[in-house]
């Protein structure tokens, strides 16, 4: 039986490694731009970017829609204020409304399809800002979500570097606490805020704690779904869904395929 202790990290070493990575990958640019959602991942990434580059080289965009809570907007602004970084607030709602008005069939789109449009609008705004300032776009995805394909292709998956992309969500939370992310943000239920009442764990179908144990068992220990389920203490059906998600989302983690011409 696995427990969370297997996911413990050396905080100082991991922090130093990520900061060095950020410095190295941005050395030929003027800094970075990232989206601030008021959530755990973006708050940690912003903190690490400031540690690596200094506040003057970090810009945060707060990009609410009609579904974004006032608490999230307030928390995002507070993160920017505490870190001393430049911050812009841009509502994506007028852009989304205009987009949908030009495509009548989109009125019948699923909430997932409409959610993906929001993510892609945000990516476009981030790249507009980054291109204008000769900066790079920092993605805020973690390994748990990346391996489940729980991100929008060319949306929040559209970025130049992923500082916490090799950390499971459990490790992200641990590192965030270590570097001083606020208790209010640490206590939040993770949500992309793409529609009313949306919660990440509801969509994933499993808690992050159990998901991380399943992923560790499968990816690091090469366990089958049955063995991973037993090791993580979950139903085998949940483990099989997690493994299927890894396989079915592989295309989201790979370069666009090209035909081989011989």
Image: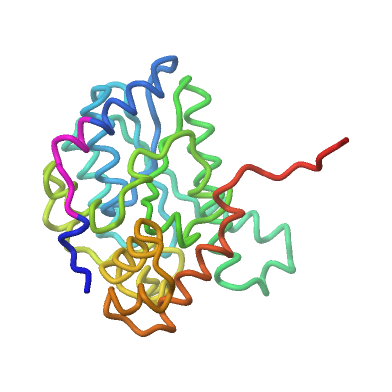
Q: From the top left corner, tell me how far across and down residue 145 is, in percent.
A: 41, 58
Q: Residue at x 50, y 60 (%)?
A: 149
Q: Residue at x 76, y 41 (%)?
A: 258
Magenta stretch containing residue 159, yes or no? no
Q: Where is residue 233, by image quadrant?
A: bottom left
Residues 201 and 225: in front is 225
Farthest top residue in view: 28
Q: From the top left corner, tell me how far across and down residue 46 is, in percent.
A: 28, 38
Give the number of callouts.
0
Tell me which segment is drawn in magenta. 8-16
Q: Residue at x 68, y 60 (%)?
A: 101
Q: From the top left corner, tell me how far across and down residue 121 is, in percent.
A: 55, 48
Magenta stretch containing residue 15, yes or no? yes
Image height of 261 relative to 64, above or below = above
Q: Main secondary structure of the magenta part?
A: helix
Which corner quadrant holds the C terminus?
top right
Residues 78 and 3: in front is 3
Picture colour scheme:
rainbow
Q: From the top left corner, tell me how far across and down residue 114 is, in percent.
A: 58, 64
Q: Where is residue 54, by image quadrant?
A: top left
Q: Residue at x 41, y 53 (%)?
A: 64
Which corner quadrant holds the N terminus?
bottom left
Query: Is residue 207 found left or right of 79 in the rendered image?
Result: right
């Amino acid at each position: 039986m696995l427990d969370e202790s297997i996911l413990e990290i050396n905080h100082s070493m991991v922090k130093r490694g990520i900061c060095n990575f950020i410095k190295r990958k941005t050395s030929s640019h003027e800094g970075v731009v990232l989206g601030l959602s008021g959530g755990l991942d973006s708050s940690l990434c912003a903190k690490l970017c400031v540690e690596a580059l200094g506040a003057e080289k970090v810009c945060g965009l707060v990009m609410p829609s009609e579904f974004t809570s006032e608490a999230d907007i307030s928390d995002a602004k507070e993160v920017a204020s505490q870190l001393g970084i430049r911050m812009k607030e841009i509502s994506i709602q007028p852009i989304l409304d205009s987009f949908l008005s030009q495509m009548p069939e989109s009125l019948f789109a699923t909430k997932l399809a409409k959610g993906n449009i929001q993510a892609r609008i945000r990516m476009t705004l981030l790249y507009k800002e980054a291109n204008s300032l000769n900066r790079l776009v920092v993605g805020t995805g973690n390994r748990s979500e990346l391996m489940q394909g729980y991100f929008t292709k060319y949306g929040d998956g559209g970025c130049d570097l992923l500082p916490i992309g090799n950390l499971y969500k459990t490790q992200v939370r641990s590192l965030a606490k270590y570097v001083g992310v606020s208790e209010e943000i640490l206590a939040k239920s993770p949500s992309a805020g793409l529609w009313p009442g949306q919660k990440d764990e509801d969509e994933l179908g499993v808690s992050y704690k159990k998901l991380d144990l399943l992923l560790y068992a499968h990816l690091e220990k090469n366990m089958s779904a049955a063995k991973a389920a037993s090791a993580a203490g979950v139903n085998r059906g949940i483990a099989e869904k997690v493994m299927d998600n890894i396989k079915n989302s592989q295309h989201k983690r790979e370069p666009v395929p090209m035909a081989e011409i011989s």
